[in-house]
Image (spheres, rainbow, N blue to C red):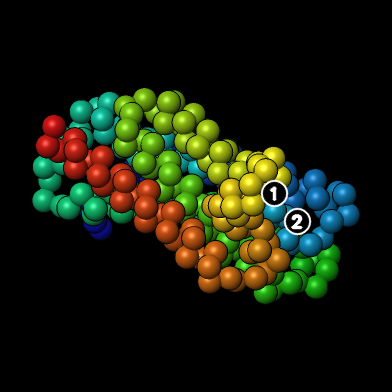
Amino acid sequence: MTAIFKREFFAYFKNPIGWVFLAIFWFFCGLNLFVLISAGVNMISYIFSNMMLVLMICIPVLTMRLMSEETRMKTDQALLTAPVSLSGIIWGKFLAAMALFGVGMAMTLVDFIVLGSFATPQVSIFIGNLVGLILMGGAFIAIGLFISSMTQSQLAAAIISFAVILFFYMLDYFVTAVPWNWAQNVLSSISFTSRYSEFTNGILDFGNVIFFASVIFIFNFLSVRVLERRRWS
């Protein structure tokens, strides 16, 4: 898994995708900070509340090549027969994407420092938002990796990943449109927006942490199953 991680992480910087991801991510982070400060907003929770939309745009760019590139270049067969477990392949790629995402997240520290010059820093709220954003980003990456494992087209992987992530984002808006209470409870419980909103208030709820961790494990498990089927096909 370590070898896969190193290979994938450094590959991001050997082709434009890694740099494009960082450029887009940092641009939107800076734009978000500039707009809110210009509007007189100096609360870190407002900064992070808009970051979910940034992730929806950036994460599909980050994950679209993870497996689709292997399939397109016909290197997936060599990878599948390498002396590494299928779970090691998936988790190595996942952690490489998470590492680059972590590099992008460094910009939030700049946001925190800048806001600290306008008002007293809200450390607990910053930590809560940071943890929530990392967990949600991990869930988005796991979804994108799963989609990428099912197609050899990077463009298709990016578009479908965005659509799936958008679906989970929009679930919160469908809650009031459903007439049944049980359905409202189900939709609300799997809504990324509802789960993430508590983090923006600095609340580290164990149930929300488990939810995003479960999404990560479920989609990575599904990615392993896709590779397993491909290995024996």
Q: Which residue is located at x 62 percent, y 68 percent? A: 128
The residue to which callout 2 is attached is: 46
Residue at 43% across, 26% down: 156
Q: Is residue 22 left or right of residue 67?
A: right
Residue positioned 20% across, 28% down in the render = 74
**Label 1 secondary element:** loop
- Mark 2: which amino acid? Tyr
Relative to residue 61, is residue 38 drawn left or right? right
Q: Is residue 48 above or below residue 168?
A: below
Dot 2: what SS?
Answer: helix
- Report the Cα–Cα distance between label 2 and label 1: 7 Å
User: In the image, which disc is placed on residue 50?
Assistant: 1
Q: Circle 2: is it few (<14), some (14-19), or many (20+) Cα within 10 Å?
A: some
- Specify the quadrant of the image occupied by residue 217: bottom left
Three-letter residue code for mark 1: Asn
Outermost residue on the front side: it is 180
- CA neighbours of label 1 inside 10 A, class few (<14), some (14 to 19), many (20+): some
Q: From where the camera sits, is residue 211 visible?
A: yes
Residue 230: which quarter of the image?
top left
Query: Quadrant of the image for the C terminus?
Result: top left
